[in-house]
Image (tube, rainbow, N blue to C red):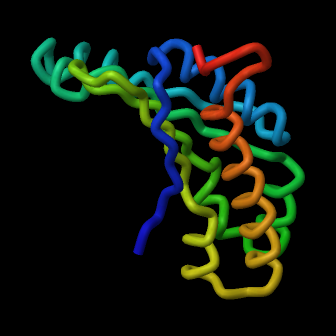
């Protein structure tokens, strides 16, 4: 089972992070948490561990309306929130990967119609955000 949707873009890591934030906001998601994996590894495990992971951030994205519906249907769904979106780039990579959790994972754990509805909506929004990150901006190629 695939549990993420991803896009690989010819963008710098910094530009991919910026465009990811913008694309998520356009789809109604706010960023509740941010984990700088590389920075954490460097602090806790040393420079070599940080180099091995490369540039890597986990953004905890939440659409309040969808989260409210999910929690109303099943309070246990809070353990799966927020939706994690990863932006990562290895040290020798020419591109950056952006991937988001596939909300259908919630459905496989729950199976209730209300969770299916939330997962369908969240999945549509997250896939639209990923598509927007890779889309060419007005006036040319992705930066």
Q: Is residue 10 above or below residue 104?
A: above
**In the image as oriented, which residue stretches furthest toward the left?**
48
- 86 vs 69, nearest the viewer: 86
Give coordinates of residue 45: x percent, y percent.
16, 22
Image side of residue 127 versus residue 12, left or right: right
**In the image as oriented, which residue stretches furthest toward the front?**
140
Give coordinates of residue 81: x percent, y percent.
63, 53
Image side of residue 53 versus residue 116, left or right: left
State the quadrant of the C terminus.
top right
**In the image as oriented, which residue stretches furthest toward the right?**
65
Image side of residue 22 versus residue 37, left or right: right
Quadrant for residue 121, please give it. Answer: bottom right
Quadrant for residue 40, please give it. Answer: top left
Q: Residue at x 53, y 55 (%)?
A: 5
Q: Residue at x 67, y 33 (%)?
A: 135
Image side of residue 98 versus residue 55, left or right: right
Give coordinates of residue 56: x percent, y percent.
38, 27
- 122 vs 39, nearest the viewer: 122
Q: Residue at x 51, y 13 (%)?
A: 14
State the quadrant of the N terminus.
bottom left
Give coordinates of residue 92: x percent, y percent.
21, 20
The image shows a total of numbered marks equal to 0
């Amino acid at each position: 089972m695939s549990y993420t949707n991803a896009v690989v873009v010819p963008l710098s890591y910094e530009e991919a992070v910026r465009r990811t934030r913008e694309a998520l906001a356009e789809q109604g998601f706010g960023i509740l948490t941010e984990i700088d994996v590389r920075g954490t590894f460097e602090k806790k495990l040393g420079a070599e561990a940080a180099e091995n992971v490369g540039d890597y951030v986990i953004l905890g994205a939440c659409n309040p309306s969808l989260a409210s519906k999910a929690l109303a249907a099943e309070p246990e769904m809070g353990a799966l929130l927020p939706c994690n979106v990863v932006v990562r780039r290895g040290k020798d990579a020419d591109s950056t990967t952006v991937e988001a959790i596939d909300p259908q994972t919630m459905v496989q754990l729950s199976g209730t119609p209300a969770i299916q509805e939330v997962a369908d909506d969240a999945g549509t929004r997250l896939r639209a955000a990923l598509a927007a990150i890779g889309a060419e901006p007005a006036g040319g190629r992705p930066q």
